[in-house]
Amino acid sequence: MSNGCDWSPDGRTFYYIDTFASSVDAFDFDPSLGVIGNHRTLVTIAANEGLADGMTVDTEGCLWVAHLGLGEVRRYSPSGVLLARVNVPTPVVTNCTFGGPNGAVLLITSATLRLPDVLLPRLGLTVEMAESAAKAVEAGGLFMCRPGCFGKPATSFAG
């Protein structure tokens, strides 16, 4: 299930999240041919670490990945090393992006979604926990923090 995708600041690496494969993958991009290749997995998400959902890339080339079901956004180096975590007061974290002056604010979205029962064991949640999370005051909120790094400008679509 394709969810997050973004480009490195130099536009030469394409990052892709496959939620149900529990991975964040990278591909080299050849702009002269317009093709991707050299597929590799950068991050494998363990069963107790939620599901990789949306993501963004900062100006340093690090990936920020929303971990649905865990209530975290994690920062990974371009080689896949975990560098930082931002905790959010609701487990259904869906995406993140940078905004504000100079792209200094990390914006994190969440949902009021009642996670399907089939996903609960993978996330370590009970039915009661999933129902409580969907109804929590924080569910569906937009959260902001200043992580000390900056977002890159949006990638333009050439087509």
Image: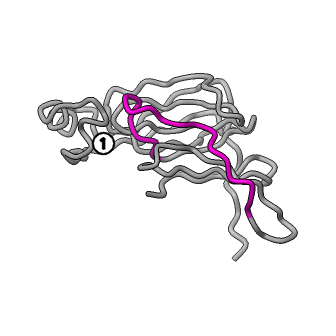
Horizontal placement of 59 versus 122: left or right? right
Q: Is residue 152 above or below residue 50?
A: below
Q: Nearer the viewer, residue 18 or 60?
A: 18
Horizontal placement of 27 versus 73: left or right? right
The N terminus, quarter of image: bottom left
Q: Nearer the viewer, residue 22 or 152?
A: 22
Q: Looking at the picture, how far across and down is residue 101, in whole percent? A: 65, 38
Q: How is the image coloured?
A: one colour
**141 falls in the magenta region:** no
**43 falls in the magenta region:** yes
The C terminus, quarter of image: bottom right
Single out the residue that lies furthest toward the right: 32
Horizontal placement of 76 versus 110: left or right? right
Q: Is residue 92 above or below residue 49?
A: below
Q: Looking at the picture, how far across and down is residue 148, in whole percent? A: 65, 24
Count neighbours of disc 1 (C-alpha within 10 A) and say few if under 14, some if 14 to 19, many if 20 or more.
some
Q: Looking at the picture, how far across and down is residue 113, in whole percent? A: 25, 47
Residue ID at (63%, 39%): 42
Q: Looking at the picture, how far across and down is residue 92, in whole percent? A: 32, 38
Kind of element beneath mark 1:
loop
Q: Magenta region, mostly helix, strand or loop? A: strand
Q: Amino acid at mark 1?
A: Gly
Residue ID at (68%, 68%): 157
Q: Identify the residue under disc 1.
A: 140
Q: Report the number of discs.
A: 1
Residue ID at (32%, 32%): 91
Single out the residue that lies furthest toward the bottom: 159
Q: Quadrant of residue 80?
A: top right
Q: Nearer the viewer, residue 64 or 155?
A: 64
Specify the segment rendered in magenta: 36-53
Single out the residue that lies furthest toward the left: 128
